[in-house]
Structures are given as structure tokens and as C-alpha cells.
Amino acid sequence: MANPTSTNPRESASDLKNKAQSTASAVADKGREMADKAKDAGASLMDKAKDVASGAGKRADDAASAVGSGMESLAGTVREKMPHEGYLGSASSAVAGALETGGRYLKEEKLSGMADDLTDLIKRNPIPAVLIGLGVGFLLAQAIRS
């Protein structure tokens, strides 16, 4: 089936070649356009994921701060209600002091500061950190197995 408007086979081949090139060019342009859209959609999803993670981190920090305030309040209650003298008095004072110190630390450092402190501690003491990790893993394995 030859092209009715063209009788020369070279012109037909040239026309086919031009059509193929223009079709290939159009497909390539469409592919680039789709890739750009996918890239934009991925960037948008990445931004939303960052926002969600940031919001979750803020809520976790707020919760840690609230727990810290509660610990400080509990320390005050322990100081008021427990005996002040004798062995029980010194124990209650130590517990209140520890609660107050821990509560202040949680309020000031929040969860992100605690993670930084833990990272620094592991960097300074890598071998004990690995041994503790192995021990915790062993205990978890025993608990799951039972």
C-alpha cells in the first residue's frame, strides 16, 4: 500500500522517518513532563512528611515537658506528706530530690535533648553501650520465647 499522494519511494521513506522522529520527540517531551510532575509530587509528599514529623516531635517534646512538670509537682508532694526525720525522712528527701532533678531535666531538655545526651553518652562509652544492647536483646529474646 503506497502513499497515493507520493509516487517516489524515497519521499515516502523520508516522510515516515520525519513522522517517527516527531512522534519520538513528542513521546520524550511527554515523558519529561510526567517525570517533572512525579518529581513535584514527590517533593510535595516529602514536605508534608517533614511537617508531620516536625509536629510529632513538637508534641513529644511538649509531652516530655508536661511529664517533667508532673515529676516536679510530685516531688513537692513527697516533701510535704512524707516524714522529715529519721531513716524514712532521708529516703523520702532523696526520692523527692531525684524526682525534682529528673523533672527539671525533662522540662529543660525535652525529648530531643535527651536523644542528644544519649548519643553523646554512647559515643563516649561505646563498649558498655554495645554490652548493654546485647543484654537488653537477650532479655527481650527470653521474654518473647516464654
Image: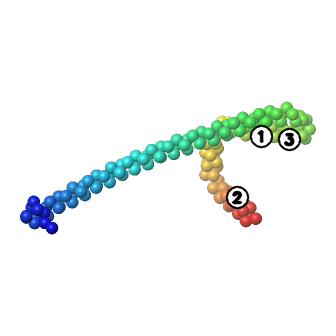
Marks 2 and 1, the one that precedes in the sequence: 1
Which residue: 63% across, 52% down?
A: 122
Residue at 7% in and 64% down: 7
Q: Nearer the viewer, residue 55 or 26?
A: 26
Disc 2 target residue:
136
Asked which quadrant contains residue 53, the reply is top right
Q: Amino acid at mark 2?
A: Val
For the residues labelled 2 and 1, the Cα–Cα distance comes to 25 Å
Q: Quadrant of residue 136?
A: bottom right
Outermost bottom residue: 1
Q: Which residue is mark 1?
A: 98
Toward the viewer: 109 or 8?
Answer: 8
> What residue does disc 3 label?
91
Q: Nearer the viewer, residue 73 or 116?
A: 73
Q: Earlier in the sequence, mark 3 or mark 2?
A: 3
Residue beneath the point at 90% across and 40% down:
88
The residue sitting at 81% across, 40% down in the picture is: 95
Q: What's the CA distance linking mark 1 and mark 3?
A: 11 Å
Q: Percent from the top left, x then y, of residue 126?
A: 63, 55
